[in-house]
Amino acid sequence: MSLMTPEERIDRIRGDHWIAFDRATIVLNRLTSLMEMPQQSRMPGLMVYGSSGIGKTMIAKRMASKYPTQYNAELGATRGACGYTVIKGTKTP
């Protein structure tokens, strides 16, 4: 951080930072295991809920950065942190 310009340091300080805590780590590990499962016709899911300000959006952002959106031309679908979304046609994963 000492090699950064003052503007870069300010941007870094003002940016989002992941602070791991037990429950979030459990949720992230579960979501990661779901994302790495082989594709099947009925994929399991996970609903994350809770009070405002407890980190649900940060968990979603962390997953989105770990699993960036990818387009699969063969399926005609986009895969992101939430699985496949069909964009055109009737093909399913």
Image (spheres, rainbow, N blue to C red):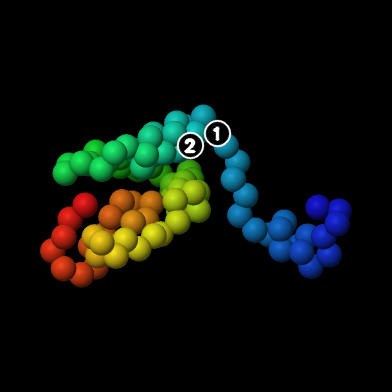
Secondary-structure class at tag 2: helix
- Look at 41% across and 59% down and name the residue there: 69
The number of numbered badges drawn on the structure is 2
Please state which amino acid type lies under the numbered disc 1: Phe
Looking at the picture, tell me which residue is in the foreground, 39 or 49: 39
Q: Position of residue 8 (x, y in %)?
A: 76, 64
Residue located beneath label 2 in the image? 24
Give me the C-alpha separation between circle 2 and circle 1: 6 Å
Please state which amino acid type lies under the numbered disc 2: Ala
- Labels 2 and 1 touching (C-beta < 8 A): yes
Q: Is residue 9 above or below residue 47?
A: below
Tag of residue 21: 1
Q: Is residue 65 above or below residue 27?
A: below
Relative to 74, 1 lies left or right: right
- Look at 37% across and 39% down and name the residue there: 36
Mark 2 Cα-neighbour bin, 10 Å: few <14, some 14–19, many ≥20: some
Q: Is residue 8 above or below residue 41?
A: below
